[in-house]
Image: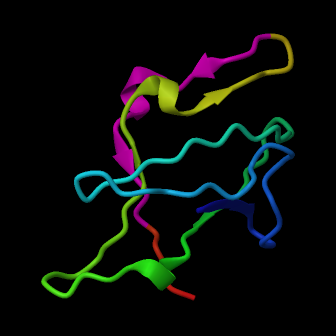
Amino acid sequence: VSLLKSDNTALGSSSNPQTCTPVSSTCSVTFNPSYSLSAGSSAVVKVRINSANFANSSSSDSLSVYVSTTGDVRWSDGTTSNIPLEASAVPFTIANVTYQ
């Protein structure tokens, strides 16, 4: 699993690919990228999954990216670090999934 910018390059210095080992049909990964975004701007972030080892003869494999709590995504405003998302922003599921 990789976390990428829109141009398919790594999102910051700490977003190296992670290995996800399923437990009870679910797996989780954590990224801690150091990435700067200017005030008033936006960014596209991609999650890349290598599905080569998806193999389920009895059912279909699927993918979802789910942010469940305010602490799942943290940010810094340059003065204060580890600012969590606002409670009204979670939970959410990434809705735009494409297959390339």
Q: Residue at x 57, y 57 (%)?
A: 19
Residue 20 at least partly seen: yes
Asked which quadrant contains residue 92, the reply is top left
Q: Image quadrant for the N terminus?
A: bottom right
Q: Residue at x 65, y 62 (%)?
A: 2
Asked which quadrant contains residue 83, the reply is top right
Q: Nearer the viewer, residue 29 or 10?
A: 29
Q: Image quadrant for the C terminus?
A: bottom right
10 in relation to 53, above or below: above
Is 90 covered by the magenta stretch?
yes
Is 42 covered by the magenta stretch?
no
19 in relation to 7, above or below: above
Residue 45 at least partly seen: no
Q: Nearer the viewer, residue 85 or 53?
A: 53
Q: Which residues are magenta?
A: 80-95
Q: Position of residue 79 (x, y in %)?
A: 84, 11
Q: Is residue 95 left or right of residue 37?
A: left
Q: Is residue 1 left or right of residue 60?
A: right
Q: Is residue 33 left or right of residue 79?
A: left
Q: Residue at x 45, y 25 (%)?
A: 70
Q: Is residue 52 left or right of residue 15?
A: left
Q: Position of residue 38 (x, y in %)?
A: 86, 39
Asked which quadrant contains residue 91, the reply is top left
Q: Position of residue 88 (x, y in %)?
A: 38, 27
Q: Nearer the viewer, residue 89 or 27?
A: 27
